Image (cartoon, helix red, strand yellow):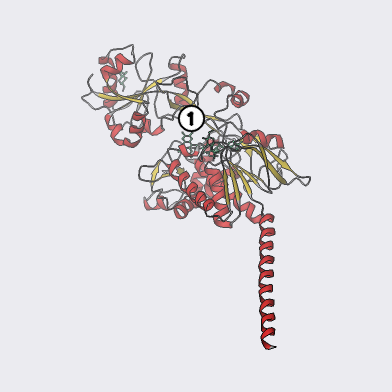
Amino acid sequence: MLKSRRIVLYFCILLIVILARNLFKTSTITQMSARSPVVIVGSGLAGLATGTQLVNKYKIPIVLLDKASSIGGNSIKASSGINGAFTSTQQALNVKDSPELFYHDTVKSSQGKGVKPLMEKLSEDSESAISWLQKEFNLKLDLLAQLGGHSAPRTHRSSGKLPPGFEIVQSLKNNLESIEKSDSGLVKISLNSTVVDVNLDSDNKVSSVAYVDSAGKTQTISTKNIVFCSGGFSFSREMLKQYAPELIDLPTTNGQQATGDGQKILEKLGAYLIDMDQVQVHPTGFIDPTNRESHHKFLAAEALRGLGGILLNPSTGKRFVNELDRRDTVTEAIQTKCPKVDNKAYLVLSEKVYEDYKNNMDFYLFKKLIKKITVDEFVSQFRLPISAKEVVADLQNYSSASSDQFGRSLVINTFGDNVASETVIYVGEITPVVHFTMGGAKINREAQVIGKDGNPLASGLYAAGEVSGGVHGANRLGGSSLLECVVFGRTAADSIANQF
Ligand SMILES: Cc1cc2nc3c(=O)[nH]c(=O)nc-3n(C[C@H](O)[C@H](O)[C@H](O)COP(=O)(O)OP(=O)(O)OC[C@H]3O[C@@H](n4cnc5c(N)ncnc54)[C@H](O)[C@@H]3O)c2cc1C
Ligand SMILES: *[C@@H]1O[C@H](CO)[C@@H](O)[C@H](O)[C@H]1NC(C)=O
Ligand SMILES: *[C@@H]1O[C@H](CO)[C@@H](O)[C@H](O)[C@H]1NC(C)=O
């Protein structure tokens, strides 16, 4: 009697446990589907920062879509670094800076265009963006550079061999990929997946996103939130023709994926595209002698001139500009003074520049973008219109002049006093290149996409990074693009989390 009772009791407990378990299971499933994944379009730094914040901080699931076959967009190419004002690195190096000073520089550079509250947010949040990268990913970001238009050294990069864009992208990518492998269901990354459309429901809320998969099939994902992190349009001749037709013949430093897909999709939905005609041209992209016609060019980093490089005019063999003037001034000098046929100048560097910038120089030499030759060989191989003796005189003049004839203030790493026709120099061919598109879909401080009436266009619709507009106005300061990716990517994630 007692025994059978005990058995019944045992079965009852078992039944309750099983029922409870199932109940718990279904409840987690309904919870998960209430939290439908956030769809992120683009895996550059903006997309990676958005995804990391959603997953690491809030445990909100994401689907990261990119039309390219690898992660990183243009962000992976960034070579100078990321801005931050009043960071621990600056304090350790005794650099005086403040968010106010950074804001002031940004507003000045924007020349009356753009959206000031976004510039304010960019500078206010810059310190926490840098410390987030340092703490969350153990990045050093211990070195500083002072780029054009900045009142203080505030562009951060890490000591070591990895360029900043590559280092940062790789860390965030590794984190998300390992979470994807962990089976938590929090992260799904789909490459070769081109987003083509966003659907809103009758309440003006995001309801789904359509993309074309690697097999060419259109797929739909139901979602309440989508963050556009799809980058700029520097590679698209079609869009340049529409917004900045004078630049249509220039090559670009951007990869072929930079075609402004996000701007187009968002415009169709009614987004306000701001400053679309503001396109940054960089004066020095390398002409690859083995592929001169390529639309894509490697960037000849500004540091090459900053560290002592000079520019010579192919039609005279002489210098023609203060190489350290503003980007637009140097570009204009190349376009008006150098031969119009190929719009190029020679970038000439000394042995000392090589030593000072060895890692990068070795890369350029390896890629055959720079040649190591004597002055004599330079004159004959590049068919200069003047003799080696005259070139030597010019190089010597640059090395010894007490005040530079073009007003260049920083004359370092010169060719030395004993320059001769046997002196070894480094020479590359450069041409102006389309580099960055300041304009894009207008956002607010919460990273919501704004409609033409100034209000958020739809609930659940966000943008961050180069696809957005208003952060830079007429001119982006070097280092502020990686920064906007981190600041507004994390902000989009915070906005989504707070809305749940
Ligand atoms: C050579 C070079 C050097 C630079 N150096 C610096 C620097 O030192 N500091 C700095 O701050 N900035 C620098 N910049 C600028 C900066 O790298 C970029 O502007 C910034 O990284 C843009 O980031 P993003 O995430 O917005 O876009 P991206 O990094 O370009 O990523 C966009 C991604 O979206 C994907 N995508 C586009 N359309 C679709 C679609 N329809 N469906 C799915 N996916 C799509 C693309 O494939 C791409 O992977 C540099 C740029 C270049 C080209
Ligand atoms: C993406 O496409 C490329 C070639 O177009 C292919 O090599 C690669 O395997 C594809 N990757 C995925 C994840 O489908
Ligand atoms: C040498 O430099 C001076 C000024 O520094 C300039 O006036 C002169 O024209 C230069 N000579 C050559 C050959 O470039």
Q: Nearer the viewer, residue 306 or 241?
A: 241
Question: What residue do we see at 53% from left, 49% from top?
Answer: 124
Question: What residue do we see at 61% from left, 31% from top?
Answer: 276
The x, y position of residue 45, in whole percent, is 52, 43
- Mark 1 CB lies closer than 8 A to ligand 1: yes
Instruction: List the single residue furthest toward the bottom.
Output: 2
> In this view of the protein, can residue 274 be seen by the observer?
no
The x, y position of residue 161, in whole percent, is 36, 42
Q: Amino acid at mark 1?
A: Thr
Instruction: List the single residue furthest toward the left.
Output: 418
Kindly identify which residue carries mark 1.
253
The x, y position of residue 117, in whole percent, is 60, 45
Q: Nearer the viewer, residue 50 or 414?
A: 50
Q: Nearer the viewer, residue 352 or 326?
A: 352
Q: Secondary structure at mark 1?
A: loop
- Residue 160 lies in quadrant: top left
Quadrant where the C terminus sits is bottom right
Q: Nearer the viewer, residue 251 or 488?
A: 251
Quadrant where the N terminus sits is bottom right
> In this view of the protein, can residue 273 be seen by the observer?
yes
On screen, residue 14 above or below 297: below
| Horizontal side of residue 332 vs 95, given as left or right | right
Instruction: List the single residue furthest toward the right.
Output: 202
| Horizontal side of residue 73 vs 354, given as left or right | right
The crowding category of the residue bearing disc 1, from other C-alpha atoms within 10 Å (few below 14, some 14 to 19, many at least 20), is: many
Mark count: 1
The x, y position of residue 173, in whole percent, is 49, 46
On screen, residue 346 above or below 361: above
